[in-house]
Amino acid sequence: MLDPGRYALVEDLGRPGYAHLGVAPSGALDQVSLRLANRLVGNAEDAAGIEALFGGLSVRFTAAATAAVTGPAVDVRIDSRPAGSHAPLAVRAGQTLTLGTPSAGLRCYLAVSGGIAVEPVLGSRSRDVLSGIGPSPLSRGDVLPLGTPGIPAGADVVVPVRAPGELVVPVTLGPRDDWFADPAGGLSAGWTVTAESNRVGLRLDGTPLRRAVDGELPSEGVVTGAIQVPPSGLPVVFLADHPTTGGYPVAAVVKTAALSALAQARPGTRIRFRPS
Amino acid sequence: MRWRRCGEDAALLDCDSPDQLRAAHATVLAARPPGVVDLVPGARSLLVVGGVAAVRALLEAADLTHPPAGEPREVTLDVRYDGQDLALIAADAGVSPEAVVSMHTEAGYTVAFTGFAPGFGYLTGLPAPLQQPRLETPRTRVPAGSVGIAGEFTGVYPRESPGGWRLLGHTSATLFDPHADPPALFAPGDRVRFRSVR
């Protein structure tokens, strides 16, 4: 690792199944992009890659490998030659692969043939930033082991992530929509992603949701995509490293297929929820 | 009992009483219907992630007044009762610090649910005089192993973290080790006792 850029983490598809012990599912926020990167280099889709916030990563290969960068379209160079994202790249031992900064979107994914083979923790190589489980954030000088390469798949549907300035996000109402006055209307109004967002959750600004029920909710289990509303009325959308139980009502849950788009929503992105 | 939708593949079961919740949890654990990814008790509810239809059918057919007996795991923790808030807790309970220790060690507890951090269990069974509010100003740093109380719960901090629970003492037990099997000392349904050591 020559330069981890802003913030780079090892992520695979996470460790679901431990929520009853207080352990979040974690894993790549934009799972569509990690799966694609893995397919491009011949890995199983659940192999571990690197999630690089705002790109900026630079790595030197000590062995020949196939690499692919996915997520938003981003400048990729091998040594100083432009190589392109969203395609399998043959990298020779001694060469350096460098990511630029995407002009839209947030998270780039680097997959390398064989996958990042650090020791799994609770069945996953993902870093959970809330609990500190899994490999530490990457830093300059880290040496990452690779697993056994597979066979690149060849043809694939290769589409860079579009990260528009305004997202319409499908949700299902509940489990606690009855705690709010006009939850569907309130959620459909415009929200703005704030800079306080991270892998735990997207914090939104907008017109606060109004409570229809006063009082405290007994703590209850929450899922990824839950739109939890604290007393401020400003929602938090829980992402992969979310707490496993919470004491504020969840007005709605984002549909699974829309989570990857949220992973690419920069601060300032406008969001409207579409309840169904 | 009432089911509430919680996204596309999960549902939340609101229970009428803690007994009904324990019975529903034990029933699903005993049968382990296919497709269930996570089963997360809360204070009054049970979150089912995956396999929702199978769990609903199972619980609709079950007699929750006679749940599967099961053998709850028993955990005993050795505690040094030297917490920073012992005097405050004793004063608010209107008893001596020694009596606080007796009350806390003589009661039996159940891990009702987890959360806050990996391995953190919310334990019910706290004697009424020890059901006290959180600190008005949370501490920025509570050491790992600290044993505290808050509201109807007692619990142990698995690792150093900020926290607002009143502290009774500390244990040297490891509450969470991701490389151990099982990784957490406490799981929902476990029975817990505390033993005073010097």
Image (cartoon, grey):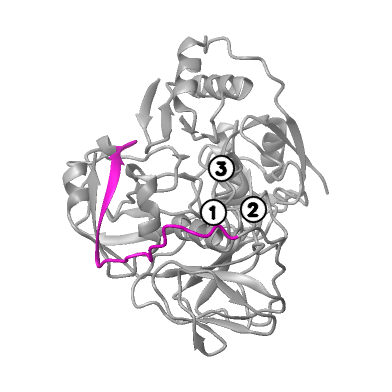
* B42 inside magenta stretch: no
Instruction: State yes or no: discs 3 and 2 in contact (Cβ < 8 Å).
Output: no
Chain letter for mark 2: A
Q: What amino acid is labelled 3 in the image?
A: Ala
Q: Is mark 3 on a helix, strand or loop?
A: helix
| Marks 3 and 2 on same chain | yes
**Relative to B57, is A127 on the left or the right?**
right
Above or below, A271 relative to B13: below
Tag count: 3
Of pointers 1 and 3, the one earlier in the residue sequence: 3
* A244 with respect to B191 (left or right): left
The structure residue drawn at horizontal position 37% and vertical position 22%, both measured from the top left corner, is B2
Q: On residue B88, which mark appears?
A: none
- Per the image, label 2 sits on a secondary structure element best described as loop
**Picture layout, residue B22 above or below residue B181:** above
Return the residue at label 2. A124
**Residue beneath the point at 62% across and 77% down:** A91
Q: Residue furthest bottom?
A: A80
Mark 1 residue element: loop
* Chain to which the residue tagged by mark 3 belongs: A
Which residues are drawn in magenta? A152-176
Distance from the alpha carbon under mark 1 to that under mark 3: 11 Å
Residue A92 sits in quarter: bottom right
A63 relative to A254, above or below: below
Q: What residue would you read off at disc 1?
A: A26
